[in-house]
Image (cartoon, coloured by chain):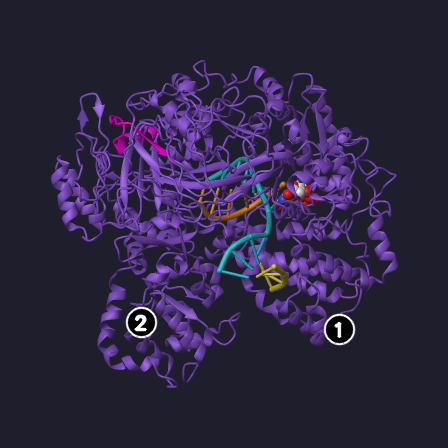
Chain colours: A purple, B cyan, C orange, D yellow
Amino acid sequence: MALQRAQLNSRRLYSELDRRMGLEDEGWETYLMRIRGVEFNEFHNGNVIPREQVAPVLMLGDDAPWDAQRVPRALSLRLDGDIEDIPFGLGECKASGTEPPPQSLLGPDAKGQQSIQGASWDSFMADIYGKPQSTANPRAKSIPKAQAGPSEEGISDSFMADVYGAGSKKPRDTGKQPSPVITTPGSPIQAVHQPSTGMSDLVIHEGLRKQDGAALGQGIAEVSRQSEGGTADSFMAEIYGAGPKDPQKDKSIQTPQPSLRRSAGSEYDSFMGDVYGAGAAPKPSHNPSEKPPSPAHVSPVAQPTSGGVPIPSSGVPPSNLRYLMAEETRLGLIRNESQFSIPGIRSRDRDESAMEGSSGVQSGPSRSNIELGREAPMRVSSVSTSYVISLHFCRAYSATGLLPSSRTGKRKVSRMLPRDGLKKQKSILGSRDGQASVSETLSSLKGGALDSLPIDVDGAGPSAPRRSSPVLAPQSDEPSAIEDFSRIATAPPRLTTQRKAYSAVETSLLTTPGDSPAVRRTVTFAAGAQMLRAPLAISGSSTSSTSAITGKGKGKASMKKLASLMPPPVVTLRANTSRQALIKKGKGKGKEPVVHMTAAEYAQTLQSKPVVPATAAVSGGDSQRKWRHLLLKGFTFFYVSGELTYASQSTKKRMDYIHCRGGVVLSTYDPELVTHIIVDTANPDKPDAGVTLRTLGLKKLGDIPDHVPTVKWKWVNSAKVVPNGDRAGNFRKVADGNGGYVTVRMDWEFMHSAFIARVHAGKGFKNTEGNEKDKGKGKTKPKTAAQRKEGENSEEEDNDSAADISDISNFTQDAPSPPPSAAEPPTYQSTSFPNEQEICNKSDPLGEFEALAKAEKEAELARERELASEFVNADPKDPTSIHQPSHGTHNLQGFLCDAPKSNSPTSNCPNQDIVDKLEALMELHRAKPTEEDKWRVYSYSKSIRKLRIYPHRITSYDEARNIPGIGDKTALKIKEILETGELRRIEIEHTDDLDVVNLFQGIYGVGQHIAYMWYSAGCRTLDNIRERKNGIKVSDVQEIGLKYYNDINTRMPRVEAGEIFTAIKRIAVSIDPHLYIEIMGSYRRGKVTCGDIDILITRPTDDGNTHEGVLITLLSALQHEGIIREYLSMPDFKDDPLEAVYRGLCIRPLREGEDHDTKRLMRRIDILTVPYKSRGAALIYYTGDDIFNRSLRLKANKMGYSLNQRGLFAGVVRSTENKMIKTCDGHIIASESEEEIFGILGVPWQEPWERVRS
DNA sequence: AGGCAGTTTTG
DNA sequence: CAAAAC
DNA sequence: GCCT
Ligand SMILES: O=c1ccn([C@H]2C[C@H](O)[C@@H](COP(=O)(O)OP(=O)(O)OP(=O)(O)O)O2)c(=O)[nH]1
Ligand SMILES: [Mg+2]
């Protein structure tokens, strides 16, 4: 039912999107894009090349349509055919969103990389979702239902609702997928692809320099008209170079993300066969049509030569050179020097049509006529380095949807829409004839830049005038395709615009010197198509942050607020103008040496100083610096320094800081003008309300208008430029003065509110109307203070029992670690770490400590060093030795995970008082919402850990400071504790809000942000939450968390966890006796109390079966048994039927003699299922503890690997932009056993109970 | 000045 | 996509 | 907050 609804919703959504974008009936000429050649002159044998050493590569063809050194203007070009059909296609992207996702992606032999990050669909939805969110409360925002044509409105409520619903349901409900509009925020090149119509557009933004590509190589992308179907192959063949892939070796590249199965190589075949064969989805693989690219089509790939630019191989139709963009390259490590088979352009028609059929959704009429269904495999042998190049395509939309296009009979013409502003667009749109409009547009352009851009839209490029009727084909010298999204985004409200988001495709090139380069496609980031109307764009940008919290953005109140937040507005202007005059005279002053001025005077002086944008020299690179002058643009501050007389140097500095970032500093408090009051009195941690009020000339804080937040300096400091398109957090768009805009993100004001009493001021949470406010984003939460508190009591536990484990689990046969049996209670035995033991024994405690510390330090420094792999406890016959060498691994040591645990007794810590104080401080920070606090906690936890094992009483600052992990700040705190026995900082940080916020965070699903929002909404008690005081929104999960607040925050005795697990296991095994079911988490680590029950389930596949479906069956059985009581989250077998997570609440079975009246607490339970192949990695993950995991993963990373719950991977490359995005999936090197992974990482084997680090 | 683990689910 | 969670 |  829900599913059905979702299907409906998504269908509606898509058709609506299509309709709005005017995509339904558009057809386009087909173009292909290709890389003519890429050359690499670097070869790094198995070593990770530090990012710093990798120069960005911009690939511009020699015959690019412009000779300029720099792309003069943004260009836009529309390609027909799916980008998927282009070497850098998004094919997978789409596939990932389709019903039988995994399968459909792979050809029978396509065991290669499945590069999709799987993001397209998700992010697509997210984008849609996020868009409004960023704008203002999406739901609150009443946007008329979509109207045909350029709707003046954005997305209607119901529309959004649909999107929303569809979003959660995801692909599985739709046959037809949304357009994988992919985008990489901030990229100079952007692309959009609409699968339903098979079109792709790209935009290259100005500023790229040809010479940027000099460092690593060059390449050319071409867009050539695709005659009719078949060319694709040869095209591809050339690009991919190799002939048919070599099925033989297929040491495929593993994709961590998508299930292992999928990515597995031949070794996985049988496994996969089992999985899929089991009657689930048909094995995607075989496209009947699938066949190796015909030899004829395969042309040799340009050989990368160390020096020259490869030339296109023969047989490639002379292409009309168009535009190419490569944003940057990165190197990653590919461990396996054997060959990789990389699926080339994969066909999707088969899968897709099937899907379409089933879904009943009709796809866009114009399917690309490129021949699909082929695989252009390629093989690269001896891959040692992977280059990742990002390509971005983009398409612009006009009010009527896509760029106008004319149909030429059956043929569609691709066109580019030159545009420079909405007005132009509008006019263009208005006149059916593009030409006129174009010229208009052009004429209005700033001029200049155009010349060098003979961009011909329709293919009539300088090199090859090809298209016949480009509707808008500008002429020669006109940069016909000028796109300026920023403008669109910030265009005057009245000009409605539909804007499709950008998309980005990332392609990674795998190559090895002297070998054929291979191109692997990787979709890195997907955003969604979105429609905005100008007003939204504007308000959204400026209020985004507020919106979510503030609720509707329509009242006048909000409009007002909006206005005050908007960049250009009157306020600023006025402020400036009024000062202009004054400035003139005060001008010279600012500069001079020591002139004493009051803060007000200085502020005035500042007005005379121009805000200087970054110099040209800077403009190329560092965006933070480049756009510094925009960071605070639009804000008008009143700065409360608390200084009675002259402004201090620091005050002036800060005023300067604001000024040069485009902010205005008022010299006198004017509630009409001010947008923010900065309270920067003597103690930054303790803003002085009295002084502030005096300065403002007010009686009480309440006299400050609600829309004016009182913030600490920290907030001002938090502004930073983020890539356009990045809508995370509290961001706003600021016009860059060149018709574009930059996105600036800042912390939420409430995070840095000077006075708790005013946390609600400004953006932040509620609005006074009390109507619905936050868009309700929050979800779940981690360990709350409440929980931690609870746990603390009994948590001391540890080693004790653990004896009962063995009879409970059977998984241990595979699990390297036999449960802590009676034989090995969690007491540390010399057996585990002989080495360590020895060290300890012979050296005095301090010596030991220092040794450890030293080791740690060395480790970091010794990256280069290659030590003979000597694993303390590693099994010699273990594959370790094989892996290590191949990678030229360095045996890093000194990570937290390396040391089996300090054996220093925690009982009598000589520095306990210090530890207690620091811990208290850490907990205070833990409840706070900023990133800063987060890392502070991370840091404190490390310091505390060090202090705990430090054998002596610390007696001085220096002594403390010498402990690695303890820096200046902490050493000072220690000093204070030593001298006074107190730590003032604790009081300071312990603001009044903290207790309440901690209380709220005790609710499962409520974290720092939501807690603060509720607080700022006026809620103070759980009852306030229950009654939804002030209209706060409480999610389903939070509701449950609230209901069982105490239960959830109470740890259970180990025994109880055992009882529950035993009951569950019994049922599970009755479902399938072959299941491996194990209790993990703190239980496995031998803890005496457990915060929850963590269960891992998998199943060997040797008999041809899998555990597919058991989780659902099990859950339902458990529910019937009365064990499971609530669902906090349900499994989503998105791309792997074997991988899922369930989270919920359960109750232990009755014991003998108990009746149903016996009171039993509700317990948290998590059940995880994983493919058998991943069991080793999953065991590590799920055994924890979390700190141990992080350390292990960190170490893996430093060694050039990446570890997650699915396995240990090599060759993973992540985007520097967004670390969560992988630009290269890497390949798996271990996952089946814990030992293997430990071994490769050079981490001595540690029993579960020895992995306690927190 | 950037990294500090890496992932999934919800709304 | 942010937030919360593991 | 600490470290590189
Ligand atoms: O941020 C986290 C949280 C958890 N885990 C892993 C390790 C952990 O052991 C396991 C289970 O998580 P849980 O939150 O249940 O922790 P626990 O170790 O079982 O402790 P508790 O007794 O509080 O449940 O998941 C992580 O890798 N990262
Ligand atoms: Mg647990």
Q: Position of residue A506 (x, y in %)?
A: 43, 38
Q: Which marked residue is nearer to the observer: mark 2 or mark 1?
A: 1
**Who is closer to the viewer here, A375 or A1034?**
A375
Identified by mark 1, the residue type is Thr
Q: Position of residue A243 (x, y in %)?
A: 47, 23
Assign a secondary structure to mark 1. loop
Figure quadrant of residue A304:
top left
| Side of A530 where A1153 appears, left or right | right
Residue of label 2: A670
Figure quadrant of residue A327:
top left
Establish whether labels 2 and 1 are both on one chain: yes
* Mark nearer the N terminus (2 vs 1): 2
Query: Can the viewer see residue A1156?
Result: no
Query: Can the viewer see residue A683?
Result: yes
Q: Residue at x 16, y 30 (%)?
A: A469
Chain where mark 2 sits: A
Residue of label 1: A955
- Tell me if the residue at label 1 has its CB under 8 Å from ligand 1: no
**Who is closer to the viewer here, A1103 or A1252?**
A1103
Q: Position of residue A1122 (x, y in %)?
A: 66, 28
- Dot 1 crowding, Cα within 10 Å, few <14, some 14–19, many 20+: few
Residues under labels 2 and 1: Cα distance? 52 Å
Identified by mark 2, the residue type is Asp
| Side of A222 where A983 appears, left or right | right
Looking at the rendering, the stretch of residues picked out in magenta corresponds to A12-36
